[in-house]
Image (spheres, rainbow, N blue to C red):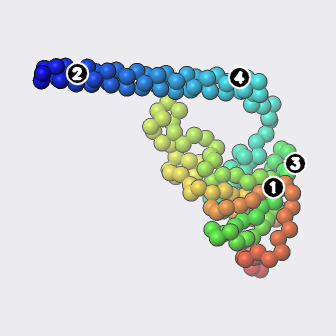
Amino acid sequence: MNRLIGTIALIVTLTTTATTADACDTTDSTLYQNSRNATRAAADIVENQPAPVDLDYSLERYNLIRRAYWVNGQREKAVSLPCAIERPLGYIVLFSDSGAIISNFVVDGKVSSLGSYLFSAYDSYNTDKEIPGIDGAYGSNVAGIFFFTIDGKYIEWTGDFLYSDIPFEIDEPVLNINESK
């Protein structure tokens, strides 16, 4: 009797294990197939809508070069840096953590990420080897943005913002930023 119960228990255990393993195989197979399908679909989209290869000038790189001069005390070079294209104007509103409007600016060119760099932070032959930035320093910047105003001022911001190519009407910002004469 004990032998019969033991045999039944063993059969139930093996059946449960086999069923569970089969279910896992099915789930893994389904996940794998979904992943392959998504990768194929994305490849088709990239092929149908390739990245533009006829851009001959980057406002992002222009901003990064200008910032490199600016933050390293060479403001005259930053201000007089020629731009090969007419820079668009943008409009930005900066918000506090509580949602209050701090200020607004007209942006000369574009808003750029503080996380953008002119070249990779890692050696192309050894991705574990960090190389210094253009200023000779290692590490990363805080998360945020930077931009230049139409009168040549440099602004960094780590909070929320709204950016557009249409002007915003802001009557009373919480904080006005005015340069002292």
Quadrant position of residue 147 = bottom right
Give the SS element for disc 1: strand
**Residue at (50% x, 51% y) in the render:** 139
Considering the numbered disc 2 on the image, is that residue within a helix, a strand or a loop?
Answer: helix
Q: Residue at x 50, y 50 (%)?
A: 138
Left or right of 138 on screen, residue 81: right
- Where residue 181 sits in the image (x, y, percent)? 77, 80
Q: Which residue is mark 4?
A: 44
Instruction: Return the mark for residue 164.
Output: 1
Q: Residues within 10 Å of mark 4 (few under 14, many from 20)?
A: few
**Residue identified by numbered label 3:** 86
Under tag 3, what secondary structure? loop
Callouts 2 and 3 close, C-beta under 8 Å: no
Pick whichever, 43 or 87, lies toward us. 43
**Type of residue at label 2?**
Ile
Residues tagged 1 and 4 counted as in contact (Cβ below 8 A) = no
Q: Which mark is residue 8?
A: 2
Q: Secondary structure at mark 4?
A: helix
Q: CA distance from mark 1 to mark 4?
A: 31 Å
Q: Which label sits in the foreground, 2 or 1? A: 2
> Could you give the CA–CA distance between mark 2 and mark 1, rounded to whole angstroms?
71 Å
The location of residue 129, given as percent across then percent down, is 45, 39
Q: Nearer the viewer, residue 116 or 22?
A: 22
Can the viewer see residue 6 in this picture? yes
Location of residue 125 in the rendering, given as x and y in whole percent from the top left corner: 50, 30
| Crowd band around label 3 with a 10 angstrom C-alpha radius: few (<14), some (14–19), many (20+) | few
Viewer-nearest of labels 1 and 4? 4
Q: Are dots 4 and 2 in contact, CB under 8 Å?
A: no
Q: Amino acid at mark 1?
A: Ser
Marks 4/2: CA distance?
53 Å
Q: Is residue 115 above or below residue 107?
A: above
Residue at 61% across / 41% down in the picture? 119
